[in-house]
Amino acid sequence: QVQLVESGGGLVQPGGSLRLSCVASRSIYSSYTMAWFRQAPGKRREYVASITTVGTTNYADSVKGRFTISRDGDKNTVYLQMNNLKPEDTAVYYCNAAAIWGQGTQVTVSS
């Protein structure tokens, strides 16, 4: 049973933007803090951003000021708006809630 489904990844040039989406089941969306993590080739998975059920947000220092996390209760969806993308943002991005992970979506930043 798939509970978190990500979409929105792709190839973008440095300085460009992408918006990732994570659709969750209603029970997960309403109960848990939702987060985004990423994993670049050869590196450990790292925290990117999170948003609580009441909308409190938190960001890794590396993305602060460039990425924005938000949630839409009507759609059970969490978004990650990524602006001013850099080559070092290249990674597979994963949606997370508690111990539940999505399948990931690839983001590649390259000219």
Image (spheres, rainbow, N blue to C red):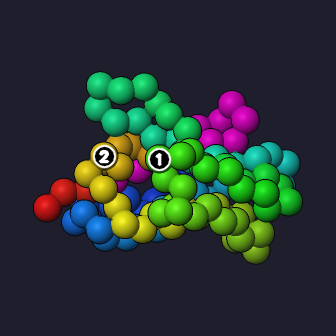
* Residue occupying image coordinates x 29% and y 25%: 42
Q: Amino acid at mark 1?
A: Ser
Please give the residue where the numbered disc 2 appears in the rendered image. Answer: 88
Q: Which residues are magenta?
A: 96-108
| Quadrant where the image shows the C terminus | bottom left
Q: Is residue 95 visible to us here? A: no
Q: Nearer the viewer, residue 38 or 59?
A: 59
Label 1, residues with CA under 10 Å away: few <14, some 14-19, many ≥20: few
Residue 105 among magenta residues = yes
Measuring 49% from the left and 53% from the top, which residue is drawn there? 63
Q: Tell me which numbered mark, 2 or 1, is placed earlier along the sequence.
A: 1
Q: Residues within 10 Å of mark 2 (few under 14, many from 20)?
A: few
Q: Main secondary structure of the magenta part?
A: strand
- Describe the element under mark 2 as helix, strand or loop: helix
x and y percentages locating residue 74 in the rendered image: 76, 74
Residue 84 x %, y %: 37, 66
Q: Quadrant of the N terminus?
A: top right
Residue that sits furthest to the left in the current view: 111
74 on left or right of 20: right
Residue 52 location in percent, x, y?
A: 79, 52
Using the image as rendered, state which of residue 79 and residue 46 is in the foreground. 46
Q: In this picture, is 24 found above or below 94?
A: below
Residue 108 position, x and y percent, is: 27, 53
Q: How many marks?
A: 2
Image quadrant of residue 55? bottom right
Relative side of 75 to 14, left or right: right
**Which of the numbered marks, if any, corresponds to residue 62?**
1
Residue 102 occupies quadrant: top right
